[in-house]
Image (tube, rainbow, N blue to C red):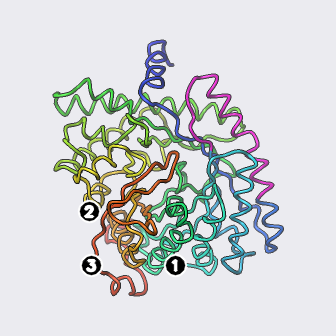
Amino acid sequence: MINMYEVSETNKMIEHENLDVRTITLGISLLDCVDSDLAELNRKIYDKITETAKDLVSAGQDIEKEFGIPIVNKRISVTPIALVGAAACKTPEDFVEIARTLDRAAQTVGVNFIGGYSALVSKGMTKSDENLIRSIPQALSVTERICSSVNVGSTKTGINMDAVRLSGEVVKAAAEATKERDSLGCAKLVIFCNAPDDNPFMAGAFLGVTEADAVINVGVSGPGVVKKALEKVRGKGFEELCETIKKTAFKVTRVGQLVAGEASKRLGIPFGIVDLSLAPTPAVGDSVAEILEEIGLERVGAPGTTAALALLNDQVKKGGVMASSYVGGLSGAFIPVSEDQGMIDAVHAGSLTLEKLEAMTCVCSVGLDMIAVPGKTSAATIAGIIADEMAIGMVNQKTTAVRLIPVIGKDVGDTAQFGGLLGYAPIMPVNEFGCEAFISRRGRIPAPIHSFKN
């Protein structure tokens, strides 16, 4: 039960500390839409989404009004489209038609984003997978709400380096296709290792094939709340520091659990998971970087940053799992550069580099996220950065991802503007030594020895 003190405390978090539910994401299976006729497939997809999600936005708005909890986004995730379109789509252009249908359906029901324009190719690529991946640049340039992801590696199967090489080319092509908007298309494209089936956060959300026909997943967010709580334990020992983070994560997750339960009841759709990630925004006071600095760093990127982030991530998970029996998705701390004012300030101050961000991804929830790099960065270099991040995920048995934005026409010292929750980002320098001979090798990097657990 929630007592009056907790209600008052939650209200304070919402009013003064940027507590919000970042997203209610409705997962919709499109497996029953599969058809060998492309026009019929598109009709079925549009009808299934618009019927299943017709009340999603209104239910979210009702919950906001009734409980006073801001719900920033209402989103949809669908079955990976490379699977859904395999029978009907013979070319990349065929997949683009599905992207337009998804975008139209998302607009009809009023959601912010729709994820699942995805392919799962950690071990190999079918022709359908390859066609979808090659279609991504065009699909992202002709739609507004589509988010795309490609899973190119896992701890069990290793890293599909053919897919990594192709992903580097696709990221560069997506940047070119949306260069008039500071290469915004790349902000809606994530390359994964160990992608979860139930992630409610964009751009990486898709509904895994093990999921139900429809499911409600909720993503919470509370960097500002954690920062405020830690201000009260300045100078205290690690035990008190950890207890404070755990207790705060518990309270934040309880809010997500409440919203998830209400959404499930009102929509008549099963509840899936709460993702208890600390997801920052460009708003002042809503920054993971500021939490790390409150822990004791002069600036993010200083010595001790990786240890402080490891502590934060672990305590957030420990607090969250006590608040909900069904924690999933990514869950922990996100470190996107463009969406976190503290990270942006650290880049400007010279304390945070791409290499330090890569080290931090060993202990955080995702990976190299929303990082703008020079537009001249080659596809091979982008693929090399993806490979490095995939290796971290594969060996450490965790999800890692790359959302890299080579901003065409801009270089180090310039700034890219993405708008809204995506914020803005300084262009960060990239190591200019080449890796073409490595990336051009064919095949896959084998799974690590500790993957064999059957």
Residue 125, percent from left and from top: 55, 78
Left of 284 or right of it: where is 105? right
Question: Which one is in front in this view, the residue at disc 2 or the one at disc 1?
Answer: 2
In the figure, is residue 434 to the left or right of 156?
left
Which residue is at 46% across, 30% downward?
19
- Look at the numbered disc 3 and give the secondary structure of its residue: loop
Mark 3 vs mark 1: which is more N-terminal?
Answer: 1
The mark nearer the N terminus, 2 or 3, is: 2
What is the residue that sits farthest to the top in this orientation? 4
What's drawn in magenta, residue-wise? 46-74
Picture quadrant of residue 331:
top left
Whether residue 93 is visible, yes or no, is yes
Q: Reply above or below: 155 against 364.
A: below
- The residue that disc 2 covers is 355
- Residue 48 within the magenta-colored segment of the rendering: yes
Q: 10 Å neighbourhood of mark 3: few (<14), some, or many (≥20)?
A: few
| Residue on which disc 1 sits | 124
Q: Which mark lies nearer to you, 3 or 1?
A: 3
Q: Is residue 210 visible?
A: no
Q: CA distance from mark 2 to mark 1?
A: 29 Å
User: What's the CA distance linking mark 2 and mark 3?
Assistant: 14 Å
Where 264 sits versus 42, above or below? Answer: above
